[in-house]
Image (cartoon, rainbow, N blue to C red):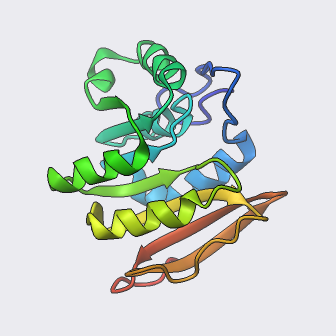
Amino acid sequence: MRVIAGRYRGLRITAPGSIRPTKDNVKEALFNVLAADIRDARVLELFAGCGAIGIEALSRGASYVCLVDSLRASTSSIRKNLERLDPEDIKKADVFTRDVISAIRLFGKRQERFDIIFLDPPYYRNWLKKCLKNINIYDILSNSGLIVAEHSKKDKAPENPEDLLLVRQLTYGDTILSIYKRRDTEKLG
């Protein structure tokens, strides 16, 4: 797995064997959709695995990336991958070994907000709905922010959870990217 574009284009990212990384074609499609929003964005990657999405965001000019995973093997892998970046970019990243729901609560208590929240929860476990509900409750999405959820076709994404609106879905084989915004913002084109 490699960084697709930006400053670190071609950089190889290593992953522990226990994770299911986002496929390159899905990652490329995701960042094509986010192209106008990624520069200077505050990005949160939940269920970060090896940190491929967060590192891609840094490569493309994100101002800050927070990577959260509950598995120590994953956060260890993320830290090793980050060590290969420029020291200034390393300073723009934080890594948390913690359950994603407790991380969302922590960010809410700190009144932290993110412009882009990416989540790729384990398939078939109802995590997507739980995460969207908590992101809304703890108000961690910026007013014009986006949530991008990667999930299986078999895991139906909630259409209008809480104060969020499903504005777009992209399908790649069995993988779907569901994109949400706050209800009070314009639809994504």
> Residue 156: where, in percent of width, then height?
69, 71
- What is the quadrant of residue 169 in the picture? bottom right
Q: Is residue 45 left or right of residue 174?
A: left
Q: Looking at the image, how many numbered discs can be counted on the residues? A: 0
Q: Looking at the figure, which quarter contains the C terminus?
A: bottom right
Q: Looking at the figure, which quarter contains the N terminus?
A: top right
Residue at 47% x, 83% y is 187
Residue at 32% x, 52% y is 104
Residue at 52% x, 52% y is 119
Q: Residue furthest right?
A: 173
The reply to whether residue 33 is in sight is: no
- Give the vertical position of 5 relative to 164 (above or below): above
- Give the vertical position of 89 relative to 149 (above or below): above
- Give the vertical position of 149 relative to 45 (above or below): below
Q: Is residue 180 left or right of residue 172?
A: left
Q: Residue furthest left?
A: 110
> Residue 99: where, in percent of width, then height?
42, 41
Residue at 26% x, 63% y is 138
